[in-house]
Amino acid sequence: MKKADHLKLGEMGEQLATDFLLKKGYVIRERNWRNVHEEIDIIASYLNTLVIVEVKTRSTATFGEPEMAVTPAKQKKLASAAGAYLESGTHKGEMRFDVISVIVAETEILITHIEDAFYPFFAG
């Protein structure tokens, strides 16, 4: 897959994930939020909980489910980015990390929402 096609697939997956969350009653606060070298795909609110969402999109599950790409290293980066976002002071309350897996196959789209997908370790 060409890099341009890969980026288009990722953008499509993020849009599908956003639409999915909106239908479930989530409020989208930010998309592709950046802080220096860190990025969060979707920052949403659900009830009183801030939800940090990592979206992984693939055209097939041949090489494993997309969510398997959220490695411990990626989790650490997301936790760091979430910490930077929280420093802005715009949220007081609970926070969780979700993963949305999107498979865009030729004949169907499969979306899997994993709530509380991981619990980052914050070293003090």
Image: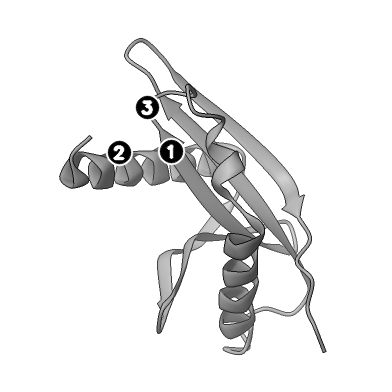
Disc 3, SS: loop
Asked which colour scheme the image uses, the reply is one colour
Q: How many residues crowd mark 1 within 10 Å: few (<14), some (14–19), many (20+)?
A: many
Q: Residue furthest right?
A: 124
Q: Which quadrant would the C terminus be assigned to in this image?
A: bottom right
Q: Tell me the distance, in whole angstroms, between the alpha carbons under discs 1 and 3.
A: 7 Å
The residue lying at 27 percent from left, 42 percent from top is 6
Q: Are marks 1 and 2 in contact (CB under 8 Å)?
A: yes
**x%, y% of residue 57?**
43, 38
Front residue of 16/83: it is 83
Amino acid type at circle 3 is Ser
Q: Tell me the distance, in whole angstroms, between the alpha carbons under discs 3 and 2.
A: 8 Å
**x%, y% of residue 97?**
68, 58
Q: Are marks 1 and 3 in contact (CB under 8 Å)?
A: no
Image mark for residue 59: 3
Amino acid type at circle 1 is Thr
The residue lying at 39 percent from left, 39 percent from top is 13
The residue lying at 64 percent from left, 69 percent from top is 76
Front residue of 38/32: it is 38
Image mark for residue 80: none
Mark 1 lies on residue: 57
Mark 2 lies on residue: 9
Between disc 3 and disc 2, whose residue precedes? 2
